[in-house]
Amino acid sequence: MKRKDKENLRNMGDAELAAQAADLKKQIFQIKFKRTAAPVENPVQLRTARRKIAMIKTYLRERAIAKSKAEVKK
C-alpha cells in the first residue's frame, strides 16, 4: 500500500474508517462470488482489499488503546 493511502486512512475519522471497511468487505464478497463463475480479471484486488481492511482495523485499534490510556491517566 502506498504511503499516501496510509496517510489518508490515518487522517480519516472512526466512522469513515468503519464505512470504508464495510465497503471493502462488500467488494471482497463480490470478487469471491464472481470468482466462482469465471476467473477474476485482477486477482490482486482481493489481496489489496484484505490488506486495506487490516490497516483500517489496526488504526481503529490504535485509537481505542490511546483513548483507554488517556482515560486511565485521568
Image: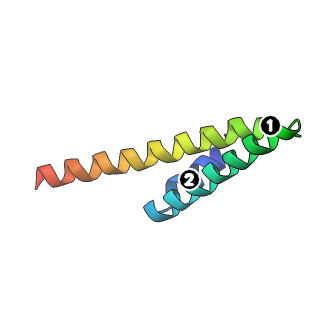
Residue 59 is situated, as x and y percent measured from the top left of the image, at: 45, 47
Instruction: Name the residue carrying label 2.
Output: 21
Name the element at disc 2.
helix
- 14 relative to 65, above or below: below
Of the 4 image quadrants, the one containing the C terminus is: bottom left
Q: Earlier in the sequence, mark 1 or mark 2?
A: 2
Give amino acid for label 1: Thr
Please report the residue visible at 45 percent of the width from the left and 42 percent of the height from the top.
58
Rounded to the nearest angstrom, the CA distance separating label 1 from label 2 is 23 Å
Residue in the foreground of this view, choosing between 6 and 34:
34
What numbered label is drawn on residue 67? none
Residue at the extreme left of the image, as rendered: 74
Residue 37 is situated, as x and y percent measured from the top left of the image, at: 85, 40
The tally of labels here is: 2
Mark yes or no: residue 13 visible: yes
Residue 25 relative to residue 11: left or right: right
Please report the residue visible at 80 percent of the width from the left and 35 percent of the height from the top.
43
Mark yes or no: residue 2 visible: no
Name the element at disc 1.
helix
Of the 4 image quadrants, the one containing the N terminus is: top right
Instruction: Name the residue carrying label 1.
Output: 36
Residue 16 is situated, as x and y percent measured from the top left of the image, at: 52, 63
Residue 1 relative to residue 71: left or right: right
Please report the residue visible at 20 percent of the width from the left and 53 percent of the height from the top.
70
Give amino acid for label 2: Ala
